[in-house]
Image (cartoon, rainbow, N blue to C red):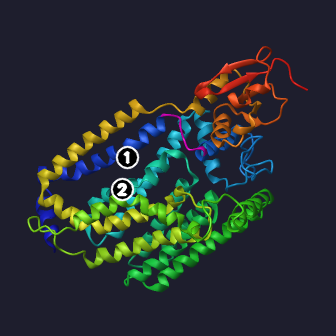
């Protein structure tokens, strides 16, 4: 039994130690609220999330269907113009459509959905931490460390309130890994034990049905686990993988037997996956460097983690933190690193790379840093209990202060304001004109459809036209009504249609 374990057991019953247990979780929750609460309550999301919410809302009211999702009669990209939205598989749209049917057409749907996804991540990350540390019970209560490491990445606290497909897909991937771990940790394998990889295979299919092949990385989990844990025979991990592959293939075969599903997935695969691999869709760069965009973005997110890690490993004789990283923690951190890499590496093939694509792999990046930090943080907290309590208390107050400050300083989104104002001026579900220079503005397309079901056209015959001063000369100021809107935008209402 190491020194920390002895200290942990002796202090476990003291009142002071109860604060050591509770305050870190309070600080963690407060830290999460800094960004999640203000970003959730301002009706502002990145245009991808707004687009997905609009598709889900449309599906909920019978405009489009699960296998023929519908966004609008207009779209700003030269893709997905098949009469339906084929840019991504439809599972998240279907799940969110259920919430729209229950709650109605309200922005609260996105808030509730994002909150459920966030809570799902928290629960599964904690469960994985405890399961991976089942032989080290003294460290299991410190599950708040990987949560802080996870939410301390800019991509995570930006992405969670933004309704990204990657968040939903990542949760299914994480669940699959947890169910596999439940199987691999069993001391005795029986026929009933294969229920765990069976459910894990279902979760991988759900991840695939949310955002395609990038959700398949959990297939590597069991094999990688066996590489680092000799107590688990390779044959056991292989059986787990085979069961999941069989389940995935069986469900996919069943889905493809349904003609609408086969048509949709064929259109999606040829238009999204193949075209991305051929570098014919959106590009985040050119040349060899473009393939490593995600690694650069990951490095940018890990500065705080590296600083904390370096600070923890600075020798300190007074608090006896000189002990090196133990072999079990080193092994488990290496395992988490490889799982994270298995989720990121396949995406490096394409040059279509955006920061939020990292979301599914980031829980394992957080676990990697958590395993590197846990021994030092635990020893530090129990060696300096009163100081830890003071710092955590101050941290909680600072977090809530920052949250209040964000509420006070956040400015309304101009495009969202205009979309809501148009409810009073333009019939719902209309197709309105838009100035040529604004047609490629994705935020306008997404928010106008989400908040008032408006489609956009560059046609000169539309009665209502949204624009700015650049296209004002096209209109007759004496005959047409020109209404100023937020952000120097204008709504032009033609009194008679031009022919």
Residue linked to disc 2: 147
From the viewer's side, name the closer residue of 280 and 390: 280
Residue linked to disc 1: 32
Give how far across and how far down residue 167 sits, in percent.
52, 54
Residue 481 as seen in the image, left or right of residue 369: right
The residue range painted magenta reads: 42-47
Rate crowding at label 2 as few (under 14), some (14 to 19) or many (20 or more) other CA atoms within 10 Å: many
Q: CA distance from mark 1 to mark 2?
A: 9 Å
Residue at image location 16% in from the left, 47% down from the top: 390
Give how far across and how far down residue 255 sits, in percent.
72, 62
From the viewer's side, name the closer residue of 230 and 35: 35
Above or below, 169 against 218 in this view is: above
Specify the principal SS of the magenta part: loop
Residues at circles 1 and 2 in contact by the CB criterion of under 8 Å: yes
From the viewer's side, name the closer residue of 138 and 336: 336
Residue 244 as seen in the image, left or right of residue 152: right
């Amino acid at each position: 039994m190491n020194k920390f374990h002895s200290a942990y057991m002796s202090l476990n019953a003291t009142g002071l130690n109860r604060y050591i247990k509770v305050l870190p979780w309070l600080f963690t929750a407060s830290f999460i609220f800094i960004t999640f609460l203000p970003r959730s309550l301002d009706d502002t999301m990145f245009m991808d999330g707004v687009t997905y919410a609009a598709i889900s809302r449309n599906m909920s009211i019978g405009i489009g269907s699960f296998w023929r999702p519908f966004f609008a009669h207009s779209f700003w990209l030269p893709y997905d113009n098949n009469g339906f939205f084929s840019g991504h598989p439809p599972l998240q749209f279907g799940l969110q459509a259920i919430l729209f049917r229950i709650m109605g057409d309200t922005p609260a749907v996105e808030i509730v959905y994002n909150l459920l996804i966030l809570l799902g991540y928290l629960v599964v990350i904690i469960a994985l931490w405890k399961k991976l540390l089942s032989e080290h019970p003294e460290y299991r209560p410190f599950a708040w460390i990987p949560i802080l490491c996870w939410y301390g990445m800019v991509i995570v606290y930006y992405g969670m309130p933004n309704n990204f497909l990657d968040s939903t897909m990542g949760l299914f991937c994480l669940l699959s890994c947890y169910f596999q771990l439940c199987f691999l940790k069993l001391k005795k394998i029986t026929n009933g034990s294969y229920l765990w990889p069976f459910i894990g295979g279902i979760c991988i299919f759900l991840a695939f049905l949310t955002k395609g092949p990038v959700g398949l990385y959990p297939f590597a989990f069991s094999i990688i686990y066996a590489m680092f844990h000799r107590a688990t025979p390779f044959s056991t991990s292989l059986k787990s993988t085979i069961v999941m592959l069989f389940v995935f293939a069986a469900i996919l075969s069943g889905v493809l037997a349904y003609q609408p599903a086969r048509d949709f997935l064929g259109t999606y695969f040829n238009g999204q996956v193949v075209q991305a691999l051929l570098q014919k869709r959106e590009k985040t760069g050119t040349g060899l460097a473009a393939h490593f965009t995600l690694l650069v973005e990951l490095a940018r997110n890990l500065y705080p983690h590296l600083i904390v890690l370096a600070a923890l490993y600075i020798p300190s004789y007074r608090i006896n933190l000189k002990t090196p990283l133990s072999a079990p923690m080193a092994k488990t951190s290496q395992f988490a690193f490889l799982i994270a890499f298995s989720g990121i590496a396949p995406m490096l093939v394409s040059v279509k790379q955006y920061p939020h694509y990292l979301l599914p792999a980031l829980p394992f990046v957080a676990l990697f840093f958590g395993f590197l930090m846990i021994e030092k943080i635990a020893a530090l907290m129990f060696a300096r209990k009163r100081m830890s309590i003071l710092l955590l208390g101050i941290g909680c107050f600072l977090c809530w202060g920052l949250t209040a400050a964000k509420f006070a300083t956040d400015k309304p989104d101009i495009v969202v304001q205009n979309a809501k104002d148009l409810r009073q001026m333009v019939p719902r579900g209309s197709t309105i004109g838009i100035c040529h220079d604004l047609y490629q503005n994705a935020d306008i397309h997404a928010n106008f459809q989400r908040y008032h079901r408006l489609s956009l056209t560059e046609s000169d015959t539309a009665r209502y036209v949204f624009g700015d001063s650049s296209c004002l000369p096209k209109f007759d100021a004496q005959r047409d009504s020109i209404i100023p809107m937020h952000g120097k935008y204008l709504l032009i209402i033609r009194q008679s249609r031009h022919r």
